[in-house]
Image (cartoon, rainbow, N blue to C red):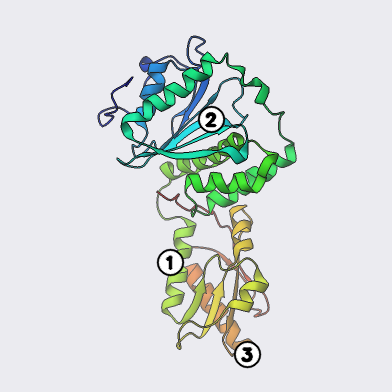
Amino acid sequence: MMADMDSENTPISPSSEDGPGPGNHDGLPVNVTTEGGGTEVRPTADRLARLVGFVGAPSCRWITVSPADAPDAGVFIQAWRVGDGDYDVETGDGTPSMIVSRPVPREEIVDAFVGWATRLADSGNATGERAAPEPDAEVLEDAEEFARLLVCRGEARFEEAVREVAEHVGDRLPAARARRIVQDVWEGILRDQETATGPTDCDRLDEVFAELRMNGIEALQDYSCCQSCALDGIAPSADRDRGFVFYHGQDTDRAIGGGGLMLSYGAFGGDNEATAAIGREVVGLIEQAGLTAHWDGDPGKRIEISPMEWRQPLPR
């Protein structure tokens, strides 16, 4: 083994005295990226061993190592670990369909990573042949938008998000580039969470929907894919349900993009006046929670919450 794996007393963000900084030409020919720790270029073997040792701490759950001369070629080794269990390790050889996953015990993880990087150095660092041209701008934009909508929902774990983005873009984008896109979105949200104070608009929205459910209204969040499918599927879940309110998946995407949140509502078996009464009840609770509702009282029009800053906590 090349390093002591006991990191309980080791800082999660090592200082520069722990090893060489970016651009060290005497180190291994790799880039190393860790959760919350940024990217280091060409670390020494000892430095890489130390970085691997941090993985598993609350603020450093994953690490990715890729060739320094071709970081987006889909050639990589990466690990994910929470707590004291084995590491989930994936390796890629540049072919999206050839990503290999396996568990690696704690006592073997440093040798796995340093050995991978050393073999890369011994091979003459000839990974440039695998480097793909810069992806098409439209492909990148599509991948970034898909990743942003997926991660901002606060439902997918990091590795799940990486897999979904990689599947979405297929062979249009190297797997390593898809991972980096998710990583950038993920870390941006983490920074926002660290500086946030008080309840978010999403917290207030949750309170509104919880109160509506207690008041006999079937209140559904991110329900179904679109308006038509949601209306087809809506039904009272209890005998006392008087009506409904919901927003669907497309509404969620619009809110994440800063366009406000649209709500649909109605009365079960009621007329326009009963539907308007549900709308007034919904608007009242929205405003009571500190959000701003826009609605002119017309039961044929949806309610809009705007502004609506969509911030959901990332899953742990």
Q: Which residue is mark 2?
A: 76
Residue 34: x and y in percent read: 45, 31
Closer to the camera, 184 or 162?
162
Residue at the image position 25 percent from the left and 29 percent from the top: 9
For residue 158, say whether it is visible.
yes
From the image, state whether disc 3 or disc 2 is nearer to you: 2
For marks 3 and 2, give the CA distance: 61 Å
Within-10-Å neighbours for mark 2: few <14, some 14–19, many 20+: many
For marks 1 and 3, give the CA distance: 27 Å
Using the image, tell me which numbered label, if any, was put on residue 271: 3
Quadrant showing the N terminus = top left
Residue at the image position 61 percent from the left and 59 percent from the top: 260
Within-10-Å neighbours for mark 3: few <14, some 14–19, many 20+: few
Q: Residue furthest top?
A: 26
Q: Secondary structure at mark 2?
A: strand
Q: Are marks 1 and 3 in contact (CB under 8 Å)?
A: no
Within-10-Å neighbours for mark 1: few <14, some 14–19, many 20+: some
Q: Secondary structure at mark 1?
A: helix
Using the image, tell me which numbered label, if any, was put on residue 207: 1
Q: Secondary structure at mark 3?
A: loop
From the image, state whether disc 2 or disc 1 is nearer to you: 2
Closer to the camera, 115 or 161?
115
- Amino acid carrying mark 1 in the image: Glu
Closer to the camera, 8 or 197?
8
For marks 2 and 1, give the CA distance: 43 Å
Name the side, left or right, on which 294 lies relative to 211.
right
- Amino acid carrying mark 2 in the image: Phe
